[in-house]
Image (cartoon, rainbow, N blue to C red):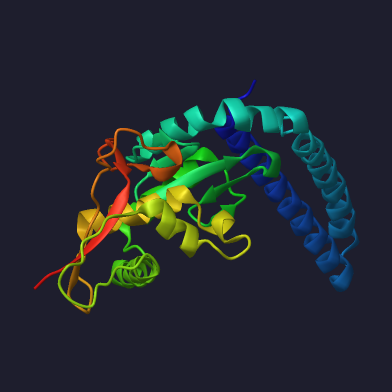
Amino acid sequence: MHAIEQAFEDAEAVAEATRKAAAGVAGKARAMAKAAREGNIGALRKAQADLDLACAALDGEVRTAGAAWPFAPQEEEAYLEAGYAEELRGAAEAAGVTLHERDGYLVAYPSMVRILPAERAVRVDRKRLRSIRPSFLAAQLLRNQRRTSGFAPARFLETLYLVYEELLREAGGDLAGRGGGRVLPLARIYKVLTALPGANRDYDRSDFARDIYTLDAKGPQETRRGFVVSFPASTGTRVRSADLFSFVDPAGENLEYYGVKFSDAG
């Protein structure tokens, strides 16, 4: 089966050749129009002959372009399911981007890529992209790494705190004074954040894990009201996989987050 990068490259080359042939037809047509406008019979006949040749050349390029894409529809989906990820990793490596696979995602912090074979698309973070040429997508991931992320960690921290405080209050605890610091499972926080219908499709567990990692690694750690966040590991002997949020950091290390705790900084 053809590698999809090469297929796109070949299709681009054929399309460019067709564009140039079309430009040639337009040029010969302009020459014929000029000869007719000026009443130059000799130039008119020459332009007609040249136009015939240019049209024949264009027809050949169009036929070639029509057969340029080598994948049948079922082959496209099969390749996106089985071969595309490895090809994308190679293109990313060539561009200077390291991709790590985790839970059905390819992670190039801060971006997370999910391949959508049936849609002939990928999802990068929350955006669905149909531009899947490996070299093109690798360049996009590199730009994402070099630019400032749109993620607002301070706002995310305050959101975590508000949900945490509400859950703690429902459980009979209080963070109003000293004595805070109870560990709540992140799974409970995530459940509240994605309670609206369809919300977890737009903000799934991997998105949440990435945002927790970003907050943990880069801060801030203290809310406006002076409570400090931490992310303790589970101390229990049994932890359901549903209660763990996994993420691969930029160095490729697998991290797992279980709980969150806010403690009075004073």
Query: In the image shown, does 96 or 178 lie closer to the viewer?
Result: 178
Q: Position of residue 53 (x, y in %)?
A: 83, 43
Q: Position of residue 31 (x, y in %)?
A: 79, 61
266 above or below 80? Answer: below
Residue located 24% across and 40% down the image:
235
For image coordinates 36% across by 51% down, the residue present is: 210
Left or right of 233, for residue 204: right
In this view, the residue in front, 23 or 134, is 134
Q: Is residue 35 visible?
A: yes
Instruction: Return the x and y of residue 60 as percentages of the image width and height.
Output: 81, 36
Considering depth in this image, is 135 or 52 the residue closer to the camera?
Answer: 135
In the depicted structure, whether residue 169 falls above or below residue 124:
below
Please name the residue shown 52% across and 57% down the image.
126
Residue 72 seen: no
State the quadrant of the C terminus.
bottom left
Residue located at (27% from left, 35% from top): 253
Q: Residue furthest front?
A: 172
| Number of numbered discs | 0
Q: Residue furthest top?
A: 1
Q: Is residue 261 left or right of residue 188?
A: left
Q: Which quarter of the rendering shows the N terminus?
A: top right
Residue 183 figure quarter: bottom left
Q: Is residue 190 left or right of residue 233?
A: right
Q: Position of residue 101 (x, y in %)?
A: 42, 34
Q: Would residue 223 be found to the left or right of residue 85 on screen?
A: left
Asked which quadrant contains residue 155, the reply is: bottom left
